Image (cartoon, helix red, strand yellow):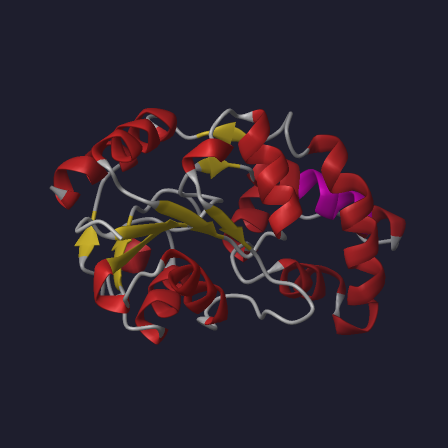
Amino acid sequence: MSGLPFLVFDLDGTLIDGYDAIGDALAFAMRALGEEPLPNVRVRTMVGHGLETLVADAVGPARAAEGVRLFRQRYPQVAVEKSHLLPGAADVLAALQARGHRMALASNKPAPFSRMILEAKGILSRFEAIAGPDETTPAKPDPAMLYQLMSGAGASADRTICIGDMEVDADFARAAGCRVVLIPGGSRTREELLGVVADGFLDSIAALPAWLA
């Protein structure tokens, strides 16, 4: 492991704006279950704690399993088309990789979906590992994903920095003893994150290389 910190990025709201795709798939599930879809501005505030939580909040716990099945049926059809890299994200990842940073991604989006989007957007190769919740790995803020990524990279907590856009990313990092940088603008505004303790607050991802330097 180089002397540079190991960087673990969030996906939605940090590297991509994927809320239209999530909103589309959630609306598909809700309509199929006889519910009126939620506006995307509302969905944006609900994202971040994993698919099961999102769907349960939208259709109720009793129908969450069927809602998740329906969401997964629709999401691959719209994930790439309706997800877009945030301004500067691709250039920042390229610059950090050229500088020698090792990078991974930890998202509460299932890992196959994350890989599909990252590959389509041309940035999958920037990451040495992609983590997401599954049957044996809980979603953020549980630090299990982060421990797995650090172990695979041979990185210690004091040499690992998480980059995200909301409270759950800060809780995720702190649970494993890592530093965290928050870049508001995805699911949360800077004002909404004022009470969150972070090592850095940046106005955009473009400011990350200078902050790391």
Q: Is residue 39 visible?
A: no
Instruction: Locate the C terminus and report the quarter of the image it occupies.
Output: top left
Residue name at image x 59 percent, y 40 percent: 115
Answer left or right for 60 relative to 41.
Answer: right
Residue 75: where, in percent of width, then height? 73, 40
Residue 182: where, in percent of width, then height? 29, 52
Answer left or right for 35 relative to 160.
Answer: right
On the image, which quarter does residue 193 sit in? bottom left
Q: Is residue 203 visible?
A: yes
> Magenta segment: does it hold 39?
no
Residue name at image x 56 percent, y 49 percent: 42
Q: Which residues are magenta?
A: 23-29
Answer left or right for 67 relative to 153.
Answer: right
Residue name at image x 47 percent, y 45 percent: 11
Residue 4: where, in percent of width, then height? 19, 48
Instruction: Return the residue nearer the eye: 95 or 54.
Output: 95
Answer left or right for 58 relative to 47.
Answer: right
Residue name at image x 21 percent, y 44 percent: 202
Mainly helix, strand or loop, the magenta region?
A: helix
> Magenta segment: does it hold 28?
yes
